[in-house]
Image: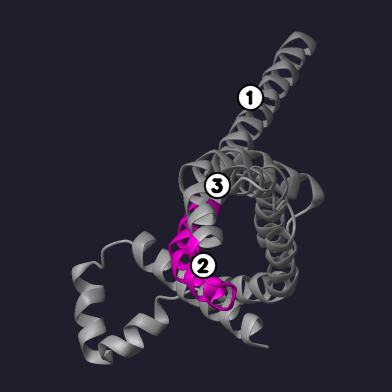
Amino acid sequence: MTQFISSLVIYFVGDLVAQSIAEPAPKEAAAEEGEEKGWVQEWSDNRDWHRTGRSLIIGGLSSIPAYRWFLWLGNNFNYGSKILSLTTKVAVNQAFFTPVFNSYFFGMQCLLSGASTSEIIERIKNTVPTSWINSCKVWPAITAFSFAYIPIQYRSIFGGVIAIGWQTYLSLLNQRAAAEEGAEQGAEQAVVTKAIVERRSEEREHRHEKQKCAA
């Protein structure tokens, strides 16, 4: 239960921080309206609570599997050489857990938003490679430090503090990917619409020419 609640807190805070970072600066009229409402009401109105709810579902479902994974990782690959043990644990975590978890995170964000299978696959392609590369800059050192110096009963707390920042990053990356995909779809739709308009215009001109010839 502790792991489950901790995960919910991490995902809740991470998503709210990400939304606060990504939200646009308020316009003058909106700022005046916000002063009338009060900052708490304004802050609440500016949050996408459906998005936060999706993050809580994702965090809740992954909490126990993730906890069991790190327990298993801590109980295995324990060699005579401490350096070899830490290196192996970090390598296994980065090679297996990180890409699987990131695929789950971004895929579930899409799925819970009502996206199609093709859109889910596209989101994973657009986010997982980038998130995995960036995770290699952060998590190997954190994982090694945790296994080397943090007692097992405190590892979840230590990891949770770091994970708030990481979940903020993942939420921002997911939002950026969604915006880019939306822009691409809008551009594609504009091209299709333009082609339809041009075709209809050509058809009208062709009919007009035929009518002139018939006359």
Tell me the distance, in whole angstroms, between the alpha carbons under discs 3 and 1. 32 Å
Q: Residue beneath label 2, please?
A: 159
Question: Which disc, if any, is residue 198?
Answer: 1
In the rendered image, the vertical position of residue 38 relative to residue 45, given as above or below: below
Q: Residue beneath label 3, please?
A: 177
> Do tag 1 and tag 2 residues touch (Cβ < 8 Å)?
no
Single out the residue that lies furthest toward the front.
80
Mark 3 or mark 2, which is nearer the start of the sequence? 2
- Mark 1: amino acid: Glu
* Residue at image coords 75%, 44%: 121
Question: Which disc, if any, is residue 152?
Answer: none
Tell me the distance, in whole angstroms, between the alpha carbons under discs 1 and 2. 57 Å
Q: Is residue 41 left or right of residue 144?
A: left
- Counting other residues with Cα less than 10 Å from the Cα at mark 2, is it few (<14), some (14-19), or many (20 or more)? some
Q: Secondary structure at mark 2?
A: helix
Tell me the distance, in whole angstroms, between the alpha carbons under discs 2 and 3. 26 Å
Image quadrant of residue 94? Answer: top right
Q: Secondary structure at mark 1?
A: helix
Image quadrant of residue 132? Answer: top right
**Can residue 59 be spotted in the picture?**
yes
Q: How is the image coloured?
A: one colour
Single out the residue that lies furthest toward the top.
213
Viewer-nearest of labels 3 and 1? 3
Give the percent coordinates (x, y) of residue 169: 46, 56
